């Protein structure tokens, strides 16, 4: 397998230059493919329009005559696949890239008219727009010259609302949403927004029959001094005897579940089955599939009997029933009561989806000298106990190997993993007290899980971990998420496999390794017990896939051992962990630590399909009381596809640590991935993202440029890991810096990501030698050769390739 083979810097540069020349030439030569009477639009200007309106006015220029942005990569790709014999194809067009903007006088006139209408909608009632076309060498320049005239300002707002109840409701809510005020510039968008908000307020307060056309405006611009009067009118229904809008309340609700995923195929039988059903608390529940219990479903029907009709509760019911993930279709209809009680009776028609599924997944992670595979099988039952409970059972296994020249890729397997896990998620918070309006802002879940993990590190250690937990996840608002694990029970047991037998040539080194507890090796073989609690809070996670400006925050804390320590002291037991005397539970020492971690990101929109992201991720694990070290699995690592991308995961730090201190290649090989962990991590990332082409093999191709920096550290000194302790005065010397470029292939449901990271500053070296970017630019052959001699079997790579699914952050 050669996918991870590193090419020389010269080869990379030559390939990049040739690719750039090919794309540039293809993009610039579009004129040779068109007919002699055609021209390509290269420039569009909108003249004499204020800056506040210029960008929006440009959007009214028809897309087919807008020049390609940036370097014209979209057009270049289109030209590469859709030209033949020196001309554009007329058939068998490949959906790649975008065609060049060929001048069309009809589209120019449409654009002129639309820009003029837009200006008038913004208060320039006397606006006139002219178009001007200049052609030279088959290249056209368009200029739209506007004469906007004076801006009309709102002189007076008046209201005509004959229904006094509606008038009172409007004025009581107006302050919460209105964009209209006297003295503002006339703007039709503000009028449209006002109409929509009035419609929503009416529908949220019982006016079931209210429709948008009841709201209209009468602007009067026949005044002097460029002013306009606006009258807001909310009409009464013309077909009502009392000439007033009716307020409706919710009557009896029918919830009907179809017999299978085909839906309601026999509506005649449906009426018969409804007649025999009892109404409980205003709801008649009919399950034709015989697969669901009543309470878990009706819990998320927010259209309650006796309450005033509220369209927002209808939408809330839609959202939660779909989030149960057991219905493929949800439809809510209404029937009006036959009497004159002004009631609407909701009918919820639910079509169940397939209940069980089995998913097999595999991946081949390879990264700078290592390759492996992971294979998993996940069985899912989405209605395990007939209450939309999700049960999952997963078996997963994998291995990782180092690649050595022309040998088999599995000749040096250093890591084997196996795990089995099961979880049950219930769509409510299982607590001994009531929670009003459960699920109002999002679906709550209680998750009970158990798992077993087996991990073998060749010639180093074998670990076995048994974990049980119960977690509560709930939504405070759409942007505020909480997760609490009040009970997290972990049982670890393992064995150290480092050979200290005198016949082993590395016996003395191995003995020294164990004697100094190098990087807490004893943790790998320690048998211990953890009883703890976890809490995580996140803000704005719902905005992560949007191209908006916002701040994302995720903070969590993991604590363990405090209750057990309190119980131990209450029983009068005293221990000295520094001397190996630990408090125990069932004969096992228990862990006591605290591990907070935060992730803060600033997403800044800087234009259409352009975004800048700044991120800082920091965490620390501190052992105290009954522990001298945090558990091995709670330690931090640096590098990888979502961290400092110029380094492979677990090959950076801690601090200034250099693996040359390990005296033999066998020892470096055995400890690979274990010796570069730490008790503290600080990382920061800066990334600029932009669209390259929105038509690329059925998806969108985006690009990124990034700078990453950070490291991991220990909180205490270690004899062998010199320079690994965090010291504020040495922070600059211990900081790693990498940069790079990336591609993101967005196919709507998945984003396939490729990043190429380049090391700039490597803290494992000293002084000016840390700035390895200089050695890369000068070739770096001798530097790499010397490094490989001192660090064998490790190899130094200036560049690091990273593949992944989803955005890095």
Image (cartoon, rainbow, N blue to C red):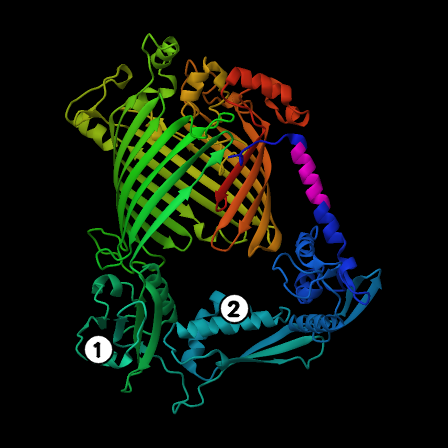
Q: Position of residue 746 (x, y in %)?
A: 53, 52
The local secondary structure at tag 2 comes to loop
- Asked whether 19 falls inside the magenta stretch, the response is yes
The local secondary structure at tag 1 comes to helix
Q: Main secondary structure of the magenta part?
A: helix
Residue positioned 45% across, 37% down in the render:
365
Give yes or no for contact between labels 2 and 1 (Cβ–Cβ under 8 Å): no
Relative depth, front residue between 684 and 28: 28
- Asked whether 655 falls inside the magenta stretch, the response is no
Q: Position of residue 16 (x, y in %)?
A: 67, 39
Magenta residues, start to end: 11-21
Is 692 above or below relative to 371? below
Residue positioned 63% across, 63% down in the render:
92
Q: Which residue is mark 2?
A: 178
Residue positioned 48% across, 78% down in the render:
212
Q: Say which mark, if any, is on residue 470.
A: none
Q: Is residue 752 left or right of residue 486?
A: right
Q: Which residue is mark 1?
A: 274
User: Which corner quadrant of the image does residue 305 belong to?
Assistant: bottom left
Relative depth, front residue between 649 and 143: 649
Q: Position of residue 771 (x, y in %)?
A: 62, 24
């Amino acid at each position: 397998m050669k996918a991870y083979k590193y090419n020389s810097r010269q080869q990379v540069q030559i390939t990049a230059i040739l690719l750039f020349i090919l794309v540039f030439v293809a993009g610039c030569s579009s004129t040779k493919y068109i007919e002699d009477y055609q021209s390509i639009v290269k420039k569009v200007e909108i003249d004499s329009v204020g800056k506040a309106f210029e960008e929006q006015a440009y959007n009214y220029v028809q897309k087919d005559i807008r020049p390609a942005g940036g370097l014209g990569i979209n057009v270049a790709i289109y030209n590469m696949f859709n030209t033949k014999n020196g001309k554009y194809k007329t058939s068998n067009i490949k959906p790649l890239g975008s065609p060049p903007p060929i001048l069309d006088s009809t589209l120019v006139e449409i654009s002129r008219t639309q820009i003029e209408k837009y200006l008038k909608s913004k208060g320039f009632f006397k606006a006139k727009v002219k178009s001007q076309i200049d052609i030279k060498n088959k290249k056209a320049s368009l200029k739209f010259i506007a004469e906007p005239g004076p801006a009309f300002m709102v002189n007076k707002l008046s209201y005509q609302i004959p229904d006094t109840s509606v008038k009172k409701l409007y004025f009581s809510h107006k302050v919460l949403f209105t964009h209209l005020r006297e003295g503002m510039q006339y703007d039709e968008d503000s009028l449209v927004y006002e109409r929509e908000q009035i419609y929503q307020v009416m529908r949220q307060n019982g006016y079931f029959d209210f429709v948008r056309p009841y709201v209209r405006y009468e602007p009067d611009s026949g005044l002097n001094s460029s002013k306009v009067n606006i009258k807001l009118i909310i009409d009464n229904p013309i077909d009502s005897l009392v000439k007033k809008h009716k307020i409706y309340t919710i009557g009896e609700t029918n919830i009907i579940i179809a017999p299978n995923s085909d839906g309601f195929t026999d509506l005649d039988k449906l009426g018969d089955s409804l007649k025999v059903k009892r109404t409980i608390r205003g709801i008649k529940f009919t399950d034709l599939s015989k697969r669901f219990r009543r309470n878990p479903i009706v819990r998320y029907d927010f259209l309650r009997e006796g309450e005033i009709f509220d369209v927002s509760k209808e939408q809330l019911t839609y959202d939660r029933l779909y989030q149960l993930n057991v219905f493929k279709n949800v439809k809510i209809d209404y029937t009006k009561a036959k009497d004159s009680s002004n009631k609407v009776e909701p009918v919820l028609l639910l079509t169940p989806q397939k209940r069980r599924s089995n998913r097999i997944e595999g991946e081949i992670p390879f990264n700078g000298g290592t390759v492996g595979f992971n294979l998993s099988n996940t069985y899912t039952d989405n209605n395990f106990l007939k209450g939309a409970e999700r049960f999952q059972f997963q078996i997963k296994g994998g291995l990782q190997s180092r690649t050595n020249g022309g040998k088999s890729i599995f000749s040096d397997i250093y890591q084997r993993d196996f795990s089995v896990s099961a979880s049950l998620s219930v769509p409510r918070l299982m607590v001994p007290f009531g929670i009003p309006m459960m699920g109002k802002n999002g679906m709550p879940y209680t998750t009970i899980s158990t798992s077993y993990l087996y991990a073998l590190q060749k010639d180093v250690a074998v670990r076995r971990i048994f974990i049980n937990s119960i977690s509560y996840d709930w939504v405070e608002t759409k942007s505020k998420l909480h997760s609490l694990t009040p009970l997290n029970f972990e049982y670890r047991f393992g064995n150290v496999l480092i050979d200290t037998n005198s016949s082993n040539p590395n016996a003395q080194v191995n003995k020294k390794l164990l004697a100094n507890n190098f990087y807490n090796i004893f943790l790998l073989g320690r048998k211990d017990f953890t009883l703890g609690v976890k809490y995580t809070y996140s803000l704005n996670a719902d905005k992560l896939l949007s191209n908006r400006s916002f701040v994302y925050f995720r903070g969590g804390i993991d604590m363990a051992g405090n209750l057990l320590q309190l119980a131990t002291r209450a029983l009068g037991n005293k221990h000295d962990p520094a001397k190996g005397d630990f408090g125990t539970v069932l004969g096992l020492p228990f862990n006591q630590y605290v591990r907070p971690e935060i992730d803060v990101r600033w997403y800044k929109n800087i234009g259409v399909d352009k975004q800048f992201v700044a991120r800082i991720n920091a965490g620390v694990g501190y052992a105290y009381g009954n522990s001298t070290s945090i558990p091995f699995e709670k330690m931090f690592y640096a590098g990888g596809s979502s961290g400092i991308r110029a380094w492979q995961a677990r090959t950076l730090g801690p601090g200034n640590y250099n693996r040359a201190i390990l005296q033999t290649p066998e020892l470096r090989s055995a400890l690979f991935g274990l010796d570069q962990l730490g008790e503290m991590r600080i990382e920061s990332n800066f990334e600029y993202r932009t669209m390259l082409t929105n038509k690329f093999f059925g998806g969108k191709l985006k690009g990124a440029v990034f700078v990453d920096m950070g490291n991991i550290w220990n909180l205490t000194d270690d004899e062998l890991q010199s320079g690994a302790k965090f010291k504020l005065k040495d922070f600059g010397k211990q900081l790693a810096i990498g940069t790079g470029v990336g591609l993101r292939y967005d196919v709507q449901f998945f984003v396939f990501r490729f990043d190429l990271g380049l090391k700039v500053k490597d803290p494992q070296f000293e002084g000016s030698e840390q700035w390895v970017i200089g050695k890369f630019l000068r070739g770096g052959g001798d530097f790499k050769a010397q490094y490989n001699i001192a660090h064998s079997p490790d190899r130094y790579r200036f560049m690091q390739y990273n593949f992944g699914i989803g955005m890095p952050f």
